[in-house]
Amino acid sequence: MVTLAPRGRYPAGEPRAAEISDVMWVFATPEAQLEHVSIRSGACRIHLGFYSRLDSAAAAEATTAICRRALASSPLLRGWEVAALGPAPEDPGPDLDPGLDPAP
């Protein structure tokens, strides 16, 4: 799980889940062996769940690299940064956007 948060002021408009997913796929490499990206957001956070065929340590490294490339290059993610790496939060809170894909 990778959590993105606004850098400084909250960016105008939060990107939609489908758009974020598309960006992540653009920056995924074949070596990441990525199978699926799950996205949810709320309370000024975007939570990204990546599913890869790699073992846990290699998958974590690969997905962090995908996010860093996307943040550095995608205008859609301008103003966002990696805020946390690790397990999914237990409860996304009441601000969860029901229009976004829930993480399993």
Image (cartoon, helix red, strand yellow):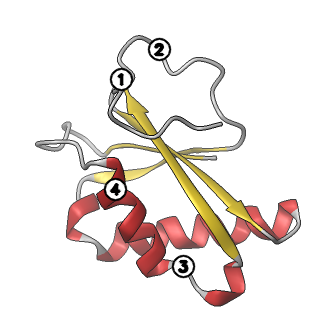
- Give coordinates of residue 83: x percent, y percent: 49, 43
State the CA–CA distance, disc 3 to disc 4. Answer: 15 Å
Q: Which residue is mark 2?
A: 93
Q: Could you tell me if the residues under marks 1 and 2 are in contact, i.e. CB atoms within 8 Å?
A: yes
State the CA–CA distance, disc 1 to disc 3. Answer: 27 Å
Where is 83 relative to 55, above or below? above
Q: Could you tell me if the residues under marks 1 and 3 are in contact, i.e. CB atoms within 8 Å?
A: no
Mark 1 or mark 3: which comes first in sequence? Answer: 3
Q: Report the residue at 49% width, 65% height from top.
A: 67
User: Any mark on residue 28, and which?
Assistant: 3
State the CA–CA distance, disc 1 to disc 2. Answer: 7 Å
Q: Amino acid at mark 2?
A: Gly
Q: Amino acid at mark 3?
A: Ala
Mark whose residue sits in front, 1 or 3: 3
Q: Report the residue at 25% width, 41% height from top.
A: 8
Mark 1 or mark 2: which comes first in sequence? Answer: 1
- Give coordinates of residue 76: x percent, y percent: 22, 62
The quadrant of the image that shows the C terminus is top right
State the SS at label 2: loop
- Give coordinates of residue 20: x percent, y percent: 36, 58
User: Any mark on residue 84, and which?
Assistant: none
Q: Amino acid at mark 4?
A: Ala
Q: Which residue is mark 4?
A: 18
Q: Which residue is mark 1?
A: 43
User: Which residue occupies the foreground of this view, 35 or 2?
Assistant: 35
